[in-house]
Amino acid sequence: MDLTTTYMGLELKHPVVASASPLSQTLEGIRRLEDDGASAVVMFSLFEEQIRAENEAFDRLIGTGTDSFAESLDYFPAVDEEHRGTEHYLNLLRRAVEAVDIPVIASLNGVTNEGWIDYAQQMEQAGAHGVELNIYYVVTDLEQTGRAVEQRYLDILKTVKAAVSIPIALKLSPFFSSMGHMAKRLDEAGADALVLFNRFFQPDFDLEQLEVAPTIQFSTPDEIRLPLLWIAVLYGRIDASLGATRGVDTADEVIKYLLAGADCVMTASALMEHGPQYLTTLVDGLTDWMEARAYESVTQMKGVMSRKNVADPTLFERTNYLKVLKWVGTSPPIS
């Protein structure tokens, strides 16, 4: 049985990829992900504003008192450059690429054009097989138009594509008014892959302290439906690879994403919850399902349930909505 797939030009031994998470924050963690079966690893994200803040704080610390005492730098402990933001990330990336045989994809969450270019170039120089641009952009300016937001994504993509030669993926938000058209524009602008969808973490309110509180929860299988819809709609209609993420808890979600048309399926929550060894469970579940239905390859099953290939493509549109409402309306009351 042939489980191989191609994602953003990279040949993978199977479609299950370890997405960005704390599991990739150490070389030992990345090695374990490979040993437990990941076909590729997306490293944890490098955040530009975090690096800038760390560098500014470090510079202020080093500069304190240096104008008064020639020996003042002796007061500060030696700083291990390996553990300073960018250098730590790039050093880990470099070592990981040398240590494992699977593709290592860097993840970048930038703010400025200079940051997107500079860090992407450094990631390429460190040996990354590709870069995933994780564009976290919550628009709170009521004067900013949807067109301006879309243009920002396109500008970031074009800027980075012009600066590096390795494949570039965009991890997208689902909040575009015309998701299909935006995907088409990004494809035409040169995106090697689109990852659907970014799982933003919205804040909660702490009622005791009356503070805005950051929150995080593992994803659940219910979250598969929105990316499943758009992967099925986009399959065969754009050239960019389609990466699926969100809601992967069992092999069932892996199978559904592939049937929709995904080139790879990424998971983080399931690996955080069950451990990296759960990768084997996901791949084995996919293999068992394919064998039971006489599929000889992932390529053969990919896109079978996409909008392009199903008998009634309107089920991806308003028809499904109407049928669900009709079903709910005719179902017997709950006693």
Image: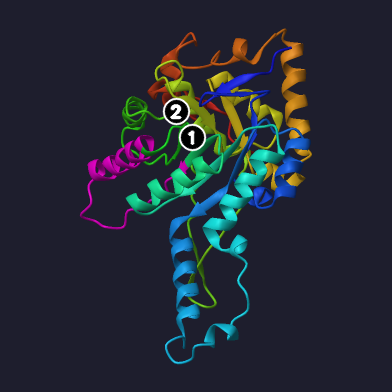
User: Under tag 2, what secondary structure?
Assistant: loop
Q: Pick the residue in front: 281 or 135.
A: 135
Lateral position of residue 25 relative to residue 106, left or right: right
Front residue (pair 88, 321)? 88
Q: Horizontally, is 197 left or right of 41 in the view?
A: left
Give the image location of residue 26, x and y in percent: 69, 52
Q: Name the residue under label 1.
A: 196
Report the front residue among 13 and 175.
13
Q: Which residue is drawn at 52% across and 78% down?
A: 209
Can see residue 218?
A: no
Where is residue 95? Give x, y as percent.
Answer: 66, 46
From the viewer's side, name the closer residue of 15 and 28. 28
Which region shows up in magenta? 133-162
- Asked if the magenta segment contains residue 157, the reply would be yes
Q: Mark 2 points at which residue?
A: 192
Q: Which residue is drawn at 59% across and 57% down?
A: 88
Which structural element holds mark 1?
A: strand
Q: In this view, does 284 lie above or below 116?
A: above
Q: Which residue is drawn at 38% across and 24% down?
A: 318
Residue 256 in the image: above or below residue 68: above
